[in-house]
Amino acid sequence: MRKLIVLILVLAAFAPLAAGGSQEKAQPAASGSTMAWIEGPSVHGLPGVNPLKVTGNIITAGSSTVFPLSERMAERFKEEGYRGNITIDSIGSGAGFERFTVAGETDIANASRGIKEKEIENAKKIGRTPIEFRVGTDALAVTISRENTFLKNVTKEELAKIFSTAQRWSDVNPAWPAQPIQRFIPGTDSGTFDYFAEEVFKSNPEPLLAASNLQLSEDDNILVQGIKGSPYAIGFFGYAYYAENESALNIVAIEGVEATAANVDNGTYPLARPLFIYSDAQIMRQKPQVAAFIDFYLSYVNEEVVRVGYFPANEDVIQKGRTAWLEAMQGLY
Amino acid sequence: MKIAIEHPFGKKMRIHERLIEATLFGFALLSIVITLGIAIILIRESYLFFSDPEVELWGFLTGKEWQPMIGRFGFLPLLNATLTTSVIAMALGIPVGLFVAVYLSEYASDKTRGILKPVLEVLAGIPTIVYGYFALTFMTPLLRSIFGMETVQIYNTASAGLVIGILVLPMIATMAEDAIGAVPKELRLAAYALGGTKMETTFKVVIPAALSGLSATFLLALSRAIGETMIVALAAGAGPNLTFSPFEAAETITGYIVRISGGDVSYNSVDYNSIFALGLILFLITFTLNMISRKISRMFHQEYE
């Protein structure tokens, strides 16, 4: 009996070591010959993808705005036969670039803003050259609760006051109620936050952050809950989250322009912005599953983008991404 | 206390006995090493924060605005929210927990005990994320229906505090019951012999005698409440706000840490470093509370022979 106890104790002491040792299993080396997934007719100039033949995992992270779109594309990729794992972390564009360019942990960065000069420099330091693929357009939705009866339209100036110095609604417009404004906005590292600060506050986030009654969250559902919760609440986020919660929220027109497909497409809606995914030629060549997924993404994104709640990007800019894909993969297929 | 046992036959300790002792000692040592490691990391990373030219210690401790991204480093709003939720939690948890403990150890029949104890244990086993959603989807609407939609914001410290109170209740009840149960039977019998009723015995003799254990319990529960994260992250609010109204949204220290470490900030920014400084403060607060609780239990400890 005693021997048994000794044995168990000794085993318990060494078990973690043993487990640690066996975890370091070598990843199967990617080779250039695994482009077997190319099959079928080409779509818009890109080679056809057969997801059934794609193997290996894909790691992506970034914008919470791009998240629903990437998620939808990944779902479709799986529906059509891909059996690997796609991770999509919704952590904000900045953090997504951080993981892509500094830590180098991800294969694809989702972003609701263009990459910054400094981020490209960081990427170069770890031997990556980010390639930009435009996948759609988002209209930033300024939303209020359904119970809010006084707000239908705001000017950009009013918007700036509402999200900074004004304490009460009546401080912005005397016709509005003398109730404190409750603000719900995306976290400081999200592309949505950056974009709003850029458009409304000329890139200076200070007044936005100094506002009272301010709730910041990277989780857009927390914002939706908060805005729903009071007739005096207001917030903003990507259009898809509004589309998803249309029954509970109202969207405010900006400068009299509503966020409709036509207004976004012709550029009159003031708060429309591009959505991107980023990768790197080296990664795409070493991990054919990444190339395959991007190929698939660029081929079918326009069939899915509206269903997710965003607006299709201009065909020309998507084509630019397709050309970049072909350049990156040159000679490999 | 260590009891030395003379080996009856003067034999040497067997080799595997030594092995067991060494292994157990190793594990004990491991827990100390881990604690030290955590403390060292916290101190090192907070140094990064405090050595930032924008940050000064005095401003950090007394400033009324917390928004590191634009250079406002006063942590009072976060501390205030943490204290608000904890005090509300204690206001619910201590009396209810104490009464449950008194009932369980002094009044309940074996049968009711047999039902009540497992129920309490179930309560203790619920993951805090579930409590968080309970706060958001049940407690907040309840508060809003009582006090009005206008007064109670959707995210508020009262709701989070009350649910933390429910969270620590089983812990208080179980530990308080142990403390009360440890009071020697002779004391109760003596009180009855002097003509005390059951209630007089319980509240004037047993509880004062168990005071050391009880206060230790309450302080441990308080440090648990201060460190609670998921509930406040979900229900208390996600923006620093210096307010004394429990019905307003306000972010606690742990809530801020969880929001920033949720991956939304670059590694070398002052926001990121600030969470270690706040972690250190939390560590110091709970560490102090635990030390005080040990002190108290020793100070009031009475030996009954």
Image (cartoon, rainbow, N blue to C red):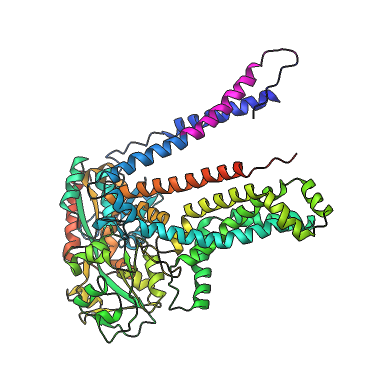
x, y percentage for residue A160? Answer: 22, 72
The question of residue B197 being in magenta is answered with no
Relative to A296, is A252 above or below? below
Relative placement, left or right, of B92 versus B5 is left
Q: Quadrant of the N terminus of chain A?
A: top right
Point out residue A99 in the picture as x, y percentages from the top left corner: 29, 47
Relative vertical location of residue A298 with respect to residue B39 in this rendering, above or below: below
The residue that appears at 31% across and 41% down in the rendered structure is B47
For the point 17% across and 73% down, which residue is it?
Answer: A267
Which range is magenta?
B9-33
Nearest to the observer: residue B175 or residue A81: B175
Which secondary structure is most common in the magenta stretch? helix
Task: Looking at the picture, tell me which residue is in the foreground, B134 or A72.
Answer: B134
At 44% from the left and 76% from the top, the residue drawn is B151
Residue A129 drawn above or below residue A171: above
Judging depth in this view, the residue of A204 and B72 nearest the camera is B72
Q: Is residue A72 left or right of residue B223?
A: left
Q: Nearer the viewer, residue B152 or A300?
A: B152
In this view of the protein, can residue A41 be seen by the observer? no
Which of the 4 quarters of the picture holds residue A112? bottom left
Does B28 appear in magenta?
A: yes
Q: How many marks?
A: 0
Q: Position of residue A186 (x, y in %)?
A: 31, 64
